[in-house]
Amino acid sequence: MNDKERKPWVTASDVAARAGVSRSAVSRAFSPTASIAPQTRERVMAAARALGYQVNLIARDMITQRSSMIGVVTAGFENPFRARLLSDLMATLGQRALTPLVTNAEDPRQVRQSLEQLLSYRIAGLVMTSASPPLSVAQQYLEHRIPVVMINREANLPGADVVVSDNAAGAVHAAQRLVRAGARRLAFVGPRGASYSARSRAAAFEQALGRGDAFGATLARVLDTPSDTHASGIDAARQLFAASERPDGVFCSSDLLALGVIDVARSEFGLRVPDDLCVIGFDDIPAAEYDAYRLTTLRQDTRGLAHAAIDLLADRMQTFDGPSRTRVVPVAQVVRDSCA
C-alpha cells in the first residue's frame, strides 16, 4: 500500500462533526472521570465506532501534561503464576484507563537499557514484581518522583509501596495440614537466598513448627534451591530422598517445585503420594489440579494483588510524598489429594 492508498487517521474533529458535538465533548467522552451527559457520551461513542476512531494517547498525554503509561517490570514469563499476575495487572490498569508498558527483566544485560527506555516515555508509575531487578533500579525512579509499587518484594525501600501475599499465614496452614495428615519428618524446599517470598515462607514454616503447631513433628531439612522451577524441584527431591532418613512431608515455596518433587519421588524412589509422602505447594497454578498431581497448595490471589498494587500506585500518583505502605493480601488453602 502506497501513501495515496493508505487510509488517513480519523481525528477527534471527525468524530465531533459526525456526532454533532464540540471537540471538547469528544475529549470528555473518552475521559472516564470527566463530566458529560450519558446521552452525549453514547452519541460520541457511536460516531467513534462508525468511523473507527482510536484515541491518540500520546497526544492526550502531551495536552494534559499527565502520562497514562505505567511501566511493569517482570521476569519469568514462562512461570504460570507470574503470567496470571501480569494478566491481572494489565486488566486492572486498563480499567483505570492506564496503559501498561511491560519490560522483561529476565536478561540482566538488557535490564538497564530497558529501564532507561521506560524513563524516556515519562511513565507515570512503575510496578515491579517478585522476579524483577534489584532495588537500585526502583530507587532511580523514585529519584525522578515516579511512584513505585513492588509486589511480593521486601519492604525495605523508603518511598516505595509494597503489596505481598500473606506468606506467614500460608506457611502456618501448610505446617498444620502436614501434621494433621500424619507427617512427622518435614522438609522445606525453596530459593530462600534469591526470593523474598521463599525466605518469608520458610521462616514462618519453621516458626510454626517451633512454637507448638507441630505436635511431635520436626523440621528435618531445609533445602535452599537456586530457583522456584520444576527443574529445581527435581534436583531438591534427589537430595531429600537419597538421605538415609527421608522426609514424609514437604512444603515447597512454589507449585512448580512441588510438582518436581512429586515426579522424582514417584519415578525414581517409588514413593506413593500421599501414602508415603505428603506434599504442599504455593501459588495454585493450573497444573496443580491435574489428575497426575492433585496438589494441595496455597492459592495466591493475583487479582487481589493487582488491585491493591494499582490502588496504591494511583493514590501515589496523586500525592507522591509520604511514608511507605504495605498491603497484605490473604491466601486460600486448596486441599487436594497430595496432602488431604
Image: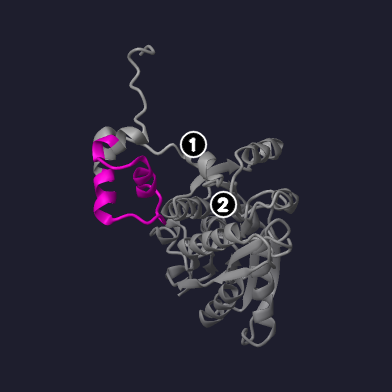
**Would you identify the image quadrant in which residue 5 lies?**
top left
**Would you identify the image quadrant in which residue 174 lies?**
bottom right
Q: Is residue 7 visible?
A: yes
Q: Was residue 31 drawn as part of the magenta stretch in this picture?
A: yes
The residue that appears at 49% across and 50% down in the rendered structure is 83
Alpha-carbon span between mark 2 and mark 1: 46 Å
Secondary structure category for the residue under label 2: helix
- x then y, percent, for residue 282: 54, 64
Disc 2 crowd, CA 10 A, few/some/many (<14, 14-19, 20+): some
- x then y, percent, for residue 113: 68, 35
Q: Nearer the viewer, mark 2 or mark 1?
A: 1
The residue that appears at 69% across and 72% down in the rendered structure is 203
Q: Was residue 13 drawn as part of the magenta stretch in this picture?
A: no
Q: Which residue is mark 1?
A: 59
The residue that appears at 68% across and 56% down in the rendered structure is 225
Q: Is residue 244 visible?
A: no
Q: Quadrant of the C terminus?
A: bottom left
Give 63 or 123, whichever is nearer the viewer.
63
Give 48 or 303, whichever is nearer the viewer.
48
Q: Which residue is mark 2?
A: 230
Q: Which residues are magenta?
A: 17-45
